[in-house]
């Protein structure tokens, strides 16, 4: 598995496949995105009741997380290393200021913004190395210097305690997808001065359930229920974490 995000998405074919195949209507990824969108919109309304935040979406890709919050943020900034991803984000109607950033080197400088901020990172942390993860969290820390600055929302789409992991155990020694545990995420956040304040799971079942005729309806029902069931996040495949900077 190629974990170099910058290399994978530096051509229009890979970007088109990501936008129109991976996220095709009714697909596994699009169903998860629908549940995440509803959650994100409710979270922003609840966490920022009086002043709309400025969104900073790091590794924004085609702008899916930004589009999920259209109308609920004052303005949005999308940052990505792939010019093709940014072009696709603009093409599909992402309302944001889009910024190209280097794949490595110094931590990118966030666009200045007054008032509360929301930093989002989706489909990034799992398939990159520790250097990229730490650089991304350092960026978030720049946007959110203290507990009152706003919230960080990150996604782990390969929880190591999920049903997906059981298949990995059966295939021990063979090529397998990356995984991150809740503890891995907690340590990463702690290293950069963040603490988890909320955690939510969005898929208990694996992609194969959605691709088998007769099982897809069952999968949708199970995952929809699990996304609001307390404790389900512990074993979910796809997990979203909400974090805030620790008090000094």
Image (cartoon, helix red, strand yellow):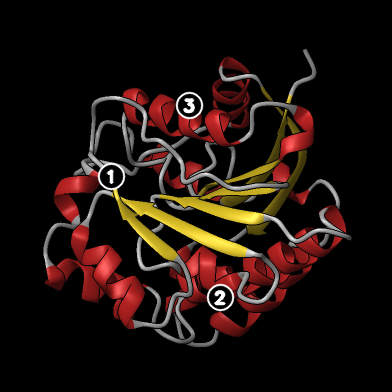
- Labels 3, 2: front one: 3
Q: Is residue 235 visible?
A: no
Q: Give percent across and percent down for residue 57.
A: 49, 53
Considering only order in the chain, which callout, 3 or 1, is on the residue closer to the N terminus?
Answer: 1
Q: Residue at x 76, y 50 (%)?
A: 232
Between residue 142 and residue 206, name the one nearer to us: 142
Q: Is residue 93 above or below residue 43?
A: below
Q: CA distance from mark 2 to mark 1?
A: 29 Å
Q: CA distance from mark 3 to mark 2?
A: 30 Å
Q: Quadrant of the N terminus?
A: top left
Crowding around mark 1 (Cα neighbors within 10 Å: few <14, some 14 to 19, many 20+) is: some
The numbered mark at residue 101 is: 1
Q: Give percent across and percent down for residue 16.
A: 23, 76
SS for tag 3? helix
Considering only order in the chain, which callout, 1 or 2, is on the residue closer to the N terminus?
Answer: 2
Q: Quadrant of the C terminus?
A: top right
Crowding around mark 3 (Cα neighbors within 10 Å: few <14, some 14 to 19, many 20+) is: some
Considering only order in the chain, which callout, 2 or 3, is on the residue closer to the N terminus?
Answer: 2
Q: Quadrant of residue 27?
A: bottom left
Q: Give percent across and percent down for residue 36.
A: 64, 65
Q: Is residue 52 above or below residue 109?
A: below
Q: Residue at x 69, y 62 (%)?
A: 40
What residue is disc 2 on? 31
Q: CA distance from mark 1 to mark 3?
A: 14 Å
SS for tag 1? loop
The numbered mark at residue 138 is: 3
Q: Is residue 29 above or below residue 125?
A: below
SS for tag 2? helix
């Amino acid at each position: 598995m190629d974990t170099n995000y910058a290399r994978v998405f530096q051509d229009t074919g890979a970007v088109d496949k990501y936008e129109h195949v991976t996220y095709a209507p009714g697909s596994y990824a699009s169903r998860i995105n629908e549940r995440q969108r509803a959650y994100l919109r409710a979270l922003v309304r609840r966490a920022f009741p009086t002043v709309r935040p400025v969104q900073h979406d790091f590794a924004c890709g085609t702008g899916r997380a930004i589009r999920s919050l259209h109308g609920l943020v004052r303005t949005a900034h999308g940052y990505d290393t792939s010019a093709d991803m940014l072009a696709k984000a603009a093409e599909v109607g992402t309302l944001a200021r889009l910024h190209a950033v280097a794949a490595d080197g110094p931590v990118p400088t966030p666009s200045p913004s007054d008032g509360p901020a929301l930093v989002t990172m989706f489909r990034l942390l799992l398939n990159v190395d520790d250097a990229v993860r730490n650089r991304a969290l350092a960026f978030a820390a720049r946007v959110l210097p203290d507990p009152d600055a706003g919230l960080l929302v990150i996604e782990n789409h390969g929880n190591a305690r999920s049903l997906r992991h059981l298949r990995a155990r059966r295939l021990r020694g063979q090529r397998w997808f990356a995984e991150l545990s809740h503890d891995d995420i907690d340590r990463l956040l702690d290293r950069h001065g963040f603490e988890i304040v909320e955690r939510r799971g969005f898929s208990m079942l694996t992609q194969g359930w959605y691709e088998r005729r007769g099982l897809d309806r069952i999968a949708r029902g199970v995952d929809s229920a699990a996304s609001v069931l307390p404790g389900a996040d512990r074993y979910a495949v796809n997990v979203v974490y909400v974090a805030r900077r620790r008090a000094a």
